[in-house]
Image: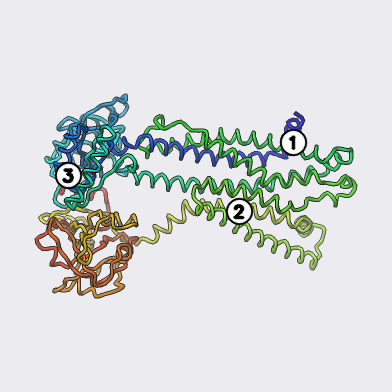
Amino acid sequence: MQSLRQLWRDWRSGELRLLFFSLVLAVAALSAVGFVAQRLQGALVRDAAQLIGGDVVVVSDHPIAPVYEERAQASDLRWMQTAVFPSMALDVSGDHTRLVSLKAVGAHYPLIAQVVLRDSLQGPEVTRSGPPSPGTVWVNASVLGALRLQVGDLLQLGNARFRIAAVLVREPDTGAGFINFAPRVMMNRADLSSTGLIQPASRVTYRLAVAGPVQAAADYVAWAQAQMRQTATRGMRIETVSDSGPAQEQTLKRAADFLHLVALITALMAAVAVAQSARDFARRRLQPCAVFKALGLRQGVLLRRYTAEFLWLGGLAAAFGVLLGLAVQAAMIGLLHGLLQVQVRELPAPGWMPALFAAATGMVLLLAFGLPAILQLARVPPLAVLRRSLGRLQSAPFVTVLAGVGAFAVLLWLQAGDLRLGAIAAGGFIGLALAFALLAWLMTHGLRRWMRGHAASSQGAGGLLQMAARQLSNRPWGAVIQITALSLGLLALVLLVLMRTSLIDAWRESIPTNAPDRFVINIQPAQTKEFLAALRGDGVTQEDWYPMLRGRLVAINGRAVFGRDYDDTRARDLIDREFNLSASATLPKANTLVAGDWDATAGSDAKGLSVEQGIAKTLGFKLGDTLTFDIAGQRVTAPITSVRHVDWSSMHANFFVLLPQSMLKDQPVTYLAAYHAPGDAQRMDDALVRQFP
């Protein structure tokens, strides 16, 4: 109880407040990040099947063969099919447009969980199983706002019009995109053909989801994988609950890494504040401790008293920090509410592990950076009452400091969850601290030399300057510590401002003023003249204009290649996807030839390929290698005759692989246009969508 009374007395005097609030801030930051990461990751694990739409999902970039449905039926598995692709939605007058993610669902949708709807923007939420009725659609609320429509109005998609039947609040199967960048429009699969939106070169993701007993689902996975190998099917993959959502996990990991880095910086800054405030507290308590020692108080009693006081302080700071962390994580989840495809109330409740870990880190922070100064209070000699020079703080024992810093470093590594991230954060912090300390020491040393060489009047500004300089020179190492701590704090604030403004401004300034800001894809050959005339009529004088077709890389130097042949994730993804292929008579803008002969691709008798430097490195291409692409069922083979460096930040249309013009003949070509919209860009966008739905 005596330690509590002493804590209250020191608190009222204001000697412990900086130390207390530094600990509270560190614990709050660490616990808030831990709570957020734990709740989001818990929801991802809990709802894995719901996120992908079933226990097993077959994903393909072309229509899925009926044999996969037939096998699911024969195995007594429930199944459903969906098709998802981007499209433009507009009101029937054509005055307003919005890019949406169009999702066509079949009769058994949703396979797991239910859809949440509203009959109006402010109406109550209701759950429903089954797809929208034919001729109707469900839309996200943002679609209504962008198109200035209400439930019951008509919405145009391609060549067809649909009545908006409900506001789509939540859908269960969001595995294809944990964070939606385009609002959803959901329609009945039976209505898809009437829109005319799917053309031979359209990018559509087809998904067949199945659900049922664990063993039946496992057998279906084995059969589907064997079927894909047997038929050498490309552009298809299997997603299961155990490996679902790599994009979601990657998104969470990146977000968690960023938040952990912020928490690490906060904890490291708090360490500086704790060390400085503990040292100041110990300096002020030196004389009282010397008096206690002179009156006969034993060193052990004094040590236990101050240690108990600090432990009480650390415990209270940890408790307040955890409570503040709970409030902060609730606010963070609320801010993320619009981006997450799950309601806050559906997230798992915060667990105790982040709170325990943050509290432990706070206590270690206090003991590692605060206790060394307190230990010196017990060693102050009684004679310091008469001779103040005997009561000065000395450097803490090296072993004590090393043990404390080591324990704190281990906790930082555990908090980061990544040795590299923790090492970078701690190493950068220590390096900057040493640099600032060296600079501060040079400044104070120079100031002391200046004082010895210059006499100043004791009156006016010169006298005040001399007094300030004398105070700094009397306690040079204290000044160094304070300057270092202040510099680190200001640096953290400056970095936050730079990250918020300067980096974004620099990126914007790096983009030319006339860089393309509009990209139009899927322009049909019969529409090219009319489309280009529309651009000229709106004042567009130059544009990127490329033919485009889709092709899948199936062989290198005559050897068949599959995604499973590569260990690198990016390489596997490139092999499993279809490439956007094009041709150009001239070297495209923002492209630089680094090897080979461009005329072998663009000349009149050209028969060679030009590949981008990055993809050549990833997939191991080199000049002279032959690549075979499957284009609409036809295989075309050509050698690599040039390698290009592409400036992907230029905003111009660019391609991994460029073909000779001759290879585009008799192929299902569409066109891509990229241009800078002059004047009223929104009016121009709306007019083009009306003219070319």
Q: Position of residue 61 (x, y in %)?
A: 21, 48
Taking the spot 46% from the left edge, 31% from the top edge, the residue there is 349
Between the residue at mark 3 and the residue at mark 1, the CA separation in whole angstroms equals 74 Å
Q: Nearer the viewer, mark 3 or mark 2?
A: 3
Image coords of residue 60 (percent x, y): 21, 47
Residue in view at x 13 percent, y 44 percent = 196
Give amino acid for label 3.
Answer: Ile
Q: Which quadrant would residue 29 be assigned to in this image?
A: top right
Q: Is residue 99 left or right of residue 478?
A: left
Judging by the rendered image, the residue that carries numbered circle 3 is: 64
Question: The disc labelled 2 sits on which kind of residue?
Answer: Leu
* Residue 593 higher or lower than 545, as above or below: below
Against 674, residue 207 (above or below) is above
Does label 2 or label 1 sit earlier along the sequence?
1
Residue matched to label 1: 10
Amino acid on which disc 1 is placed: Asp
Q: CA distance from mark 2 to mark 1?
A: 28 Å
- Give the distance between the C-alpha atoms of the residues marked 3 and 2, in whole angstroms: 58 Å
Res 72 → quadrant: top left
Q: Nearer the viewer, residue 566 or 543?
A: 566
| Residue 488 marker | 2
Whole-percent x, y for residue 497 in the image = 51, 51
Quadrant housing the N terminus: top right
Query: Which is more foreground, mark 3 or mark 1?
Result: 3
Label 3: which secondary element: loop
Of the two numbered discs 3 and 2 on the same chain, state the one appearing first in sequence.
3
Q: Secondary structure at mark 1?
A: helix
